[in-house]
Amino acid sequence: MKAYSLDLRQKIVKAHLAEKMSIRKVAARFAVSKSLVQKLVKLQRTEGNLQAKQRGKPQFSHLASAEPEVKALVTGHPDATIAELCELFAVKTGNWVSQSAMCRYLQKLGLNRKKKLGTVAKPRQKESKN
């Protein structure tokens, strides 16, 4: 759902404060909830503006400002897995990042990760019943 426009927010608060209308009458007049009117009046008194706040969780990553460190980790540890790179990054910078964040950042930088080959499983031979 979209936030109410700034113009409507100002009209609601003005109707309550300047025109001395009750919260219930303002809510009925503008077809909004009583709690919205209360929140807007409180917001005007405490913050002094009625701008809608940004929705959602703020997007912040420790990786955004650490491009040289990440490149150094990848070149210094070419066979490291994503999990190992996360641990190395945490040791080096003191900031922990998730594996998915590290993977997205490596893709953004164009640094492909090859998987460790480890040991290759040998094909099992059938046992003979002699």
Image (cartoon, helix red, strand yellow):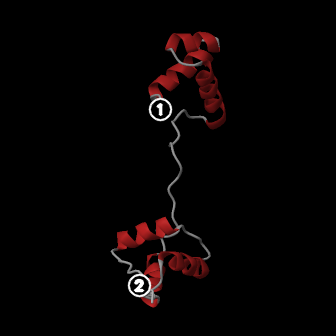
Please state which of residues 56 and 8 is positioned toward the viewer in this rendering. Answer: 56
**Quadrant location of the C terminus?**
bottom left
Q: Is residue 58 above or below residue 34?
A: below
Helix, strand or loop for disc 1: loop
Residue 53 makes an appearance in the image: yes
Residue 21 makes an appearance in the image: no
- The x, y position of residue 63, in whole percent, is 49, 70
Please state which of residues 105 and 4 is positioned toward the viewer in this rendering. Answer: 105
Q: Earlier in the sequence, mark 2 or mark 1?
A: 1
Where does label 1 land, which residue?
Answer: 3
- The x, y position of residue 111, in whole percent, is 36, 77
- The x, y position of residue 87, in whole percent, is 57, 78
Q: Is residue 1 left or right of residue 25?
A: left
Question: Mark 2 or mark 1, which is nearer to you?
Answer: 2
The amino acid type found where label 1 is placed reads Ala
The amino acid type found where label 2 is placed reads Lys
Q: Quadrant of residue 125?
A: bottom left
Residue at x 57%, y 22% (from the top left corner): 13
Q: Is residue 41 above or below residue 76?
A: above
Where does label 2 land, which residue?
Answer: 126
Is mark 2 in CB contact (under 8 Å) with mark 1?
no
Q: Quadrant of residue 28?
A: top right
Helix, strand or loop for disc 2: loop
Q: Quadrant of residue 113?
A: bottom left
- The x, y position of residue 121, in whole percent, is 43, 85
Residue at x 62%, y 23% (from the top left corner): 35
Please state which of residues 16 and 124 is positioned toward the viewer in this rendering. Answer: 124
